[in-house]
Image (cartoon, helix red, strand yellow):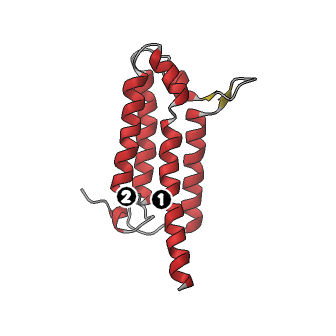
Amino acid sequence: MAYPSDKALGGDPSGSPLSDAERMRRLSRLRTVATVMDTAIAIPGTNIRFGADSLLGLVPGIGDFAGALVGLAIVNEARRLGAPRHKMAKMIANIGVDTLVGAIPLLGDVFDVYFKSHRRNVQLILDHFEGDVSEQRQTRAR
């Protein structure tokens, strides 16, 4: 299914392109969500950080799936921003790995501390837009 935002890079569902300020606001919000979900809390005296995703994973049965729902919201925002389908597929794979391994008792809880799917996914989005900016700069320089 083609979405209007697929046609206009960085567009919203109505099909109109986003301003640079709006795109930056949305990317900033995604960074904040990823930080809260993956690295908001530091263990003093170590380099270990974890977030709400690790804490949610402690709730048997539904915790990992709640984290996956947040991850899918990030993928949806990537779609709305105009991220390519292959990057969204990688994002969904990251969420799948995090959810499936995270659901394994004890091992999954440790895994959640180290595999930060939300941060990985937001970085995929940021890398995409950095590439767009670089291409635009090179085109203008010619």
Which quadrant holds residue 12? bottom left
Could you give the CA–CA distance between mark 1 and mark 2, rounded to whole angstroms? Answer: 8 Å
In the rendered structure, the answer to whether residue 119 lies left or right of residue 40 reads left
Q: What crowding class fits label 1: few (fewer than 14 Cα within 10 Å), some (14-19), or many (20 or more)? A: some
Q: Do the residues labelled 1 and 2 touch (CB within 8 Å)?
A: yes
Q: Tell me what residue is drawn at x 51 percent, y 56 percent.
A: 127
Quarter of the image with the N terminus is bottom left
Foreground residue among 37 and 123: 123
Badge 2 element: loop
Disc number placed over residue 97 in the picture, else none: none
Q: Residue at x 54, y 82 (%)?
A: 140
Q: Which amino acid does label 2 sit on?
A: Pro
Amino acid at dot 1: His
Identify the residue shown where x is 50% and y is 26%: 112
Q: Where is residue 11 in the image (x, y as percent from the top left)?
A: 43, 64
The residue located at (56%, 83%) in the rendering is 141
Residue 13, picture quadrant: bottom left
The residue at which mark 1 appears reads as 128
Q: Name the secondary structure under disc 1.
A: helix
Q: Residue 91 location, x and y as percent?
A: 40, 44
Residue beneath disc 2:
84
What percent of the width, then of the height, locates residue 9?
42, 66
Residue 7 vs 57, above or below: the answer is below
Q: Nearer the viewer, residue 113 or 71?
A: 113
When the figure is inspected, residue 101 is found, relative to residue 18, above or below; the finding is: above
Q: Is residue 64 above or below residue 130?
A: above
Q: Residue furthest right?
A: 45
